[in-house]
Image: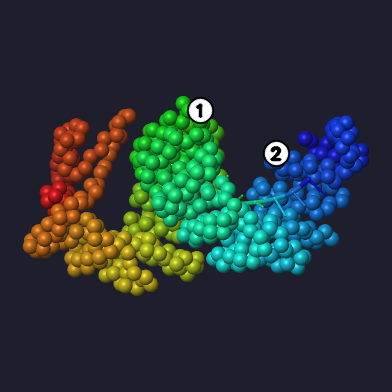
Amino acid sequence: MSSKKLLSITHFHPIPPIIRNSLQLVQNTCTQSNAPVQPLCPSHLATNLMKSFLQKGLIGEARALFDEMPDKDVVTWTAMISGYTHCNYHTHAWSLFYEMLKTEIDPNAYTMSNVLKACKGMNRLAFGALVHGMAIKHGIQGSIYVDNALMDMYATCGASMDKACMVFLHLKERNAVSWTTMIAGYTHRGDGHGGLQIFRQMLREEAELNPYSFSIAVRACTSIGSLAFGQQIHTAVTKCGLESNLPVTNTILDMYCRCGCLSEANQYFHEMIHKDLITWNTLIAGYERSDPSESLYIFSLMDSEGFSPNCFTFTSVLAACANLAILNCGQQVHGGIICRGLNRNLELSNALIDMYAKCGNINDSHKVFSELSERNLVTWTSIMIAYGAHGYGKEAVVMFDEMVRSGIRPDRIVFMAVLSACSHAGLVDEGLRYFKTMMGDYSITPDQEIYGCVVDLLGRAGRVEEAYQLIQSMPFKPDESVWGALLGACKEHRHPNLGKLAAERALDLRPNMVGAYLMLSNIYASEGKWGEFAKMRKMMRGMGSKKEVGRSWIQVRDHVYSFVVGDRTGHQVKFVNGVLELLIWHMEETGYIPDIDCFEYDLEDVT
DNA sequence: GTAGGGTTAG
């Protein structure tokens, strides 16, 4: 609609013919059915029109109409605020509410619940608390909508569930939404146990169960990895006849996937009465985590079943290609993304950066990154991980500083990326500087993983004693990954005593850590303590476990060949070994003496 | 003529 036309509607005098005709038609219909004739109300009409603009996502048009309206009442203001929140324009909604407060018009319960949703969207606890105060001041209390919105806001923005619980406890009436909001509040902040506790209370009090309550309860089970509870709820869902409710069944499918029960998930998928794109995406994402090639197979079936992949599908498929390191498959998927016009999607671009890097093509990874007009924290993290993994530590550090300059606040994960990049490039002092910045400037408390990165940073550079001192200074008990990092450094830089200590600590925490036994036995061997060595190897045999073999692979045309150390059975292995011998000969010719000191004894010989 | 909670990726 042109702006001229729009203005003519908003001025109301005269009412445009098209709207007059529609109203006439309504009036005639009402007269025919003996219903009372509604008086012509321009304000209602304009609000309706605004609503239809908003439903079509025409926010600018809706706002223009709103601005032109001469006498706006609370409903008009609330409709516009609500329109903004629905389209995720939370700051616009808040500004408009602020404008409204400057007028004589008082907000009502509808306004408040919408504004609280905007506060939630902005993650602004202080704004939400302010609205809470205003609601009390304006006497807007006892509205279940406002109370539920308050709980939702406090649950999402608050540091804990305390405030949400307080509202919940003081509720005069609790409806289905109140319960769901509380369970979701706990679950979304990672406290599935808390969520299930509320769900149990709900069952005890015989509150009304609906599809929403079931799907959030299943989600709570998934978040704590409780297959047993999840299955119980699944049974209840079947008893209640909700097998055709897609949000519920998709959540159950996701539960089986995330609990690692892929065969159950697959069976359930085939039994599902209805399937939609989310169903397919859930299964593809589920397989991507444990069996990427199966995930690609399911993806290949989608089309014949009449489903077209979307951004969610492609992110999982790209992750599968990345984990399998099959570049040409990833390139084909990239082609599919471009064909569907999805290449402007930031999340997909982030997944592409990751895929190209993991498939060994750092150039295309960088190309995708450099062509982006918008970048978020995940984008920067992805490119830093890519550079770090390819040995471009200095470039990763430059990226980090550039990211901060662009106004993006780093989080724990991006610090891990930059620390890891520093570690692999030997940039120890830079890494330590970032570690300090992280704690000092960004108030990020280091966890086991971060400590693991710093121990690795120091350890790789040979500063093993310092790494051990850092472990001793940790404010909590180091886990096996931290000891594992130290162990690796001790092995590399020949610190048998500290190595023994690290291996023992790691084995205390994870007695089946075969790698630690292996390393310990190697240390004994290097010291010539063959008795201890034999003891270790015997223990390993007794455990009946094997260290997972490091596997490498190479893609030649359309086939991926994988091989392990000492492989004698692989494809064209004689030819490969021949080339290798030739290379070693050339190396020796140019004066290079290869380091073939056998510090690590082959596990295959003893198991 | 204005209001609510649950499903997939990073």
**Quarter occupied by residue A166:** bottom right
Q: Is mark 2 on a helix, strand or loop?
A: loop
Residue annotated with mark 2: A56
On screen, A63 above or below A467? above
Whole-Å distance between the Cαs marked 2 and 1?
A: 27 Å
Indicate the amino acid at tag 1. Gly
**Quarter occupied by residue A109:** bottom right
Indicate the amino acid at tag 2. Lys
Horizontal and vertical percent position of residue A43:
85, 46
Horizontal and vertical percent position of residue A131:
70, 63
Side (left or right) of A569 relative to A384: left
Colouring convention used in this rendered image of the protein? rainbow
Chain bearing tag 1 is A
- Count residues near mark 1 (Cα–Cα under 10 Å), then give few for <14, some for 14-19, many for 20+: few
Residue annotated with mark 1: A306
Q: Of label 2 and label 1, which has the lower sequence position? A: 2
**Residue A8 in sight here:** no
